[in-house]
Amino acid sequence: MTENFNLFIALLLFMCFIQTGLSIKCYDCRSDWDPKCGDPFDNSTVPFKDCNQEPDLDHLPNLRPTMCRKIRQKVNGKWSFFRSCAYLGEPGINGDERFCLMRTGSYNIFMEYCTCNSKDGCNSGILPTATKITLILTGILTLNYFN
């Protein structure tokens, strides 16, 4: 029985080193080209774009998009909205997707930059996922239950 337990623990530890390779799908639009991209957002005709299919960028070699972004920008009193895949940054502010980065500049410029990776389209709650420690604890408790 100890040999089975050791094998199980070894497999469990091995699984902790497996990285998931899921891609995120984001809305891809600009309000200056498509008014439905504005606020409020009408996603009935705006399709998802698979960020894994985005081309490599020359100025960001070996970097792939891992998040969605929404940019709300006001230049000289006119609002524009941009939604696309994001290559850089972190989701939200300090990992909290409820908050966005805000910047102001000269010449009456205001920008709000929001990023998220909780789910395709990032329009609602966080996708529940099991953490590695949860998997390990579940495995150990299961083994103890059946022994």
Image: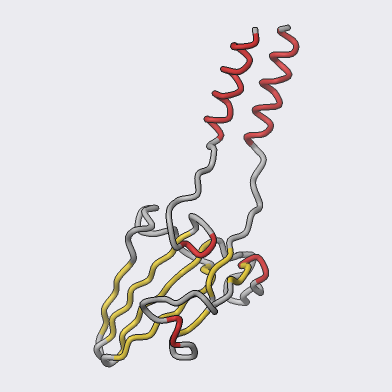
Q: How is the image coloured?
A: secondary structure
- Name which residue lies at 66% across and 52% down: 21
Residue 3 image position (x, y, % from top left): 75, 10
Point out the residue furthest to the front here. Answer: 44
- Name which residue lies at 46% across and 69% down: 69
**Quadrant in the picture for the N terminus:** top right
- Name which residue lies at 53% across and 30% down: 133
The total number of labels drawn is 0
Residue 2 image position (x, y, % from top left): 71, 7
**Quadrant in the picture for the C terminus:** top right
- Name which residue lies at 45% across and 61% down: 116
Q: Nearer the viewer, residue 60 or 52?
A: 52
Which of the 4 quarters of the picture holds residue 9?
top right
Residue 96 image position (x, y, % from top left): 36, 53
Is 38 located above or below residue 130 in the figure?
below
| Image-based side of 145 in relation to 127, left or right | right
| Image-based side of 2 in relation to 66, left or right | right
| Image-based side of 3 in relation to 59, left or right | right
Residue 95 image position (x, y, % from top left): 39, 53
